[in-house]
Image (spheres, coloured by chain):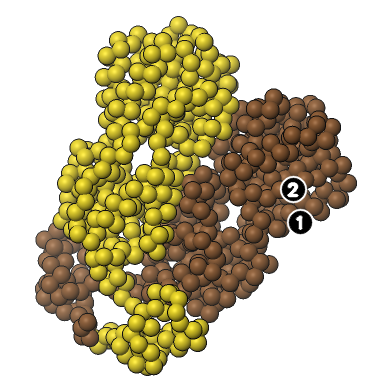
Chain colours: A brown, B yellow
Amino acid sequence: MTTARVTIKEVAARAGVSKGAVSLAFNHKPGLSEATRERIFQAARELGWAPNPTARTLAGSRVDVVGLAICRPARLLGLEPFYMEFVSGVESVLTEHSCSLLLRLVRNVEEEAGLLETWWRSRQIGGSILVDFRADDPRVAVAERLGLPAVAVGHPSLTGRLTSVWTDDATAVREAVRYLGALGHRRIARVGGAAALGHTAIRTAAFDEAAGALELAGAWQVTTDYSGEAGARATRSLLAAGPADRPTAIVYDNDIMAVAGLSVAAEMGLSVPADVSLLAWDDSQLCRLTHPTLSAMSHDVHGFGAEVARTLFSLVPGGAAGSRRMDTPVLTPRGSTAPPGG
Amino acid sequence: MTTARVTIKEVAARAGVSKGAVSLAFNHKPGLSEATRERIFQAARELGWAPNPTARTLAGSRVDVVGLAICRPARLLGLEPFYMEFVSGVESVLTEHSCSLLLRLVRNVEEEAGLLETWWRSRQIGGSILVDFRADDPRVAVAERLGLPAVAVGHPSLTGRLTSVWTDDATAVREAVRYLGALGHRRIARVGGAAALGHTAIRTAAFDEAAGALELAGAWQVTTDYSGEAGARATRSLLAAGPADRPTAIVYDNDIMAVAGLSVAAEMGLSVPADVSLLAWDDSQLCRLTHPTLSAMSHDVHGFGAEVARTLFSLVPGGAAGSRRMDTPVLTPRGSTAPPGG
């Protein structure tokens, strides 16, 4: 290991150009001839010099790489429209800033907390997006201790003093249940997401509260892993009871489970919405491609990802940005919801 | 800018530990007490030392970060099951190696070629996955010139001397057309992907060849941007002709367009498969969630991504690995295909 570091000045001198020209070449900016660029790269190679990504990512005003760790099994990730839409929204803003996303699947939040520390200390990232908060999430303390510029996607009750971007899930769940109640449904079920997640708990509590307020005759909630298979299983189990005992309406925590529920109803000879109303969540393109089309709690997931990325960029220079509540998902009625028996 | 670089030895000395312990701490490996780790990080902070990612990514036997640039509009990416399944397969192997994926959306291959050079010269990646090859793709020459360890996802006729992992699209298209022909269809259409892509051209030529061999009474091909909307539009246009003139079978280049096609048939009062047979491509979970379920040309996209990542790892130490053809997509008949009028 050498202890004397080659400087950009030496590279510039060897190539016979200015330091600015070396910088242009390595940042792949226009303004240099191909021959000059090649001479600069040649000089850098001979001297063993490479630009220090550290200087760029930590300069304060610029982030080249943003980290995102996702704690979901790889298999599931490919089937969940939410994440890909979210990531595409993040990427749309990163691209404007010539920034890349460093993506990693992790097994648990502890692993993610360790990874954040490694990424940050080895200067691989200039900031990070944190998703899927749990109660007492260890990432809050780690991000604070490191001084890591981070935007938390989650309700402020879960994200400590981190800047958060969030949606009001409780209000949206109450709205969904009230809508089904207004249609005349008295037996309503919810097929929820992963039990360990903070926003699942928030939705579960809100559903209980809304069901209580309406004095429903029947209210069911199940948690799943968000997969289509789990959604199908839950729907089959809920609809297996006799016509007088089963739910007449089901609300799902994502789209793919609602699409699976639609297929299960057909398989069981039940008509949607005459026998059972189905209400999806997130409202990706899928909901408009089924027959009947799926009513859904809609929000702009792509725009959500974009806003999270914009908030991160606003955070980095000064170190502070206010938390921001996104628009609450709104009901988009389509063909899959109607009065019971209607 | 300082010219004397702090070494790991100095950090170890200041923290009163071995160099190995510093390495453990920064690689987030077990075997150190929390107090020791904190002392090491403290010493590194005081000396302004950080591990050099360069040393790790270019050591020859290890890649910490793998690059993947995708040349698709952000919006589309979120709606295309293929990419998320592919990425999830890549991630499943990267995770085993404690590796992250550096993801970037680009506007064109020229931008990607420049980005690869920047990533590689600034040592942000140890290797890259290249997708969506075009004829005369500039990335081939760039990767060769840089000596960048890269795996090309595409037919060897498109990927030059790069190691490639590919599927035999031509054989699969011929198989799809022959199957529909064997059911008795004489008017067959294909709703294809993006015209600029090499594998779209390969599929188009194979379709023409198969249609010619079967002396079909009618054969149509259209290209799209792969979106559900474009698939719906193409299907509507194909089915607008009278019953004696329109296709009785349509094969799609992905899943989401076939799902959209199913919805268009319902909207136009046509029964699937009695009035028109639909055949999807890729066979994500979506195909089993529609009603009727979608027949599809099936391959394991998750496994494809995993194999690409494994090939990249096998490439990096020695610099050579053979190109590899994946299993050809096979026909999975389900509810959306039948003899015409059946």
Give the distance between the C-alpha atoms of the residues marked 1 and 2, in whole angstroms: 10 Å
Q: Badge 1 sits on which subunit?
A: A
Which residue is nearer to you in this view: A53 or B274?
Answer: B274
Question: Where the C terminus of chain A falls, by quadrant?
Answer: top right
State left or right for residue B60 relative to residue A299: left
Residue on which the image places disc 2: A221
Q: Residue at x 23, y 45 (%)?
A: B323
10 Å crowding of disc 2: few (<14), some (14-19), many (20+): some
Q: Is residue B310 visible?
A: yes
Q: Residue furthest top?
A: B244
Residue on which the image places disc 1: A205
Q: Residue furthest front?
A: B31
Q: Residue at x 50, y 27 (%)?
A: B294
Q: Residue at x 26, y 25 (%)?
A: B205
Question: Residue A10's x, y, as percent?
Answer: 16, 79
Question: Residue B193's x, y, as percent?
Answer: 37, 32
State left or right for residue B50 relative to residue A270: left
